[in-house]
Image (cartoon, rainbow, N blue to C red):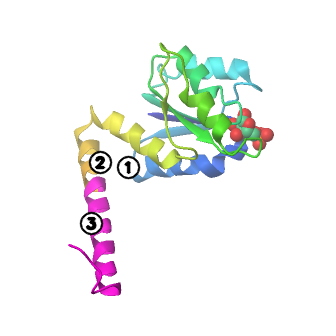
Amino acid sequence: MIGIIMGSRSDLEVMREAVDTAKEFGVPYEVTVVSAHRTPDRMVAYAKGAAERGIKVIIAGAGGAAHLPGMVASLTTLPVIGVPIKSRNSIDGWDSLLSIVQMPAGVPVATMAVNGSRNAGLLAVQILALSDKELGHKVIEHKEKQVASVLSGIDAMKVQFPNHFDE
Ligand code: RP5
């Protein structure tokens, strides 16, 4: 249901969080390498065939001159979430970020933070949850857990700084 692709196997370290998020929410996913530069024909075949295979949303991570998310978005009507990767050929992540975020009008790519594959996974899950009630409940539970985790951190701080806490 979620197609997770990346420009190189070297991107997997970052993209693993998107995979882990799909697993955590029990959403089926496929994960593979599709390079816009090195395997352009594979990229076209992947993007054109994704919807037919049952993919509902694509997460595409790439570093450096990161054409993959935009090119894939140009070839499909599925929503595409782009993850700029700070790869070894990247200028601190800026090149990847700008390549992905600055899409011209007409071909949107939902761009995450640099190396933000956790949020890419969560956004994909939220998109799927629009038409899946059970998944929607899991998203709500996840949000509630986050609130509880922040609140317990605040309690810990109160213990650490008893006289310096403003309620
Ligand atoms: C991009 O170039 C890939 O997405 C990767 O982030 C970067 C480096 O690729 P490798 O040289 O490590 O294969 O196309």
Query: How many C-alpha atoms fall within 10 Å of the one at disc 1: few (<14), some, or many (≥20)?
Result: some
Q: Farthest residue toward the top?
A: 106
Quarter occupied by residue 129? top left
Give the mark nearer the N terminus: 2 vs 1: 1
Label 1: which residue? 25
Contact check, label 2 and label 1, Cβ < 8 Å? yes
Part of the protein shown in magenta: 142-167
Residue 138 is situated, as x and y percent measured from the top left of the image, at: 28, 50
Quarter occupied by residue 136? top left
Q: Is residue 10 above or below residue 142?
A: above
- In the image, ligand 1 is in what quadrant? top right
Mark number, residue 139? 2
Magenta stretch secondary structure, dominant? helix
Q: In the rendered view of the protein, which quadrant contains the N terminus?
A: top left
- Does 23 lie within the magenta span? no
> What kind of element bears circle 3?
helix
* Amino acid at the residue labelled 3: Ala
The foreground one among 93 and 140 is 93
Query: How many C-alpha atoms fall within 10 Å of the one at disc 2: few (<14), some, or many (≥20)?
Result: some
Distance from Cα at disc 3 to Cα at disc 2 = 14 Å
Q: Is residue 121 above or below residue 152?
A: above
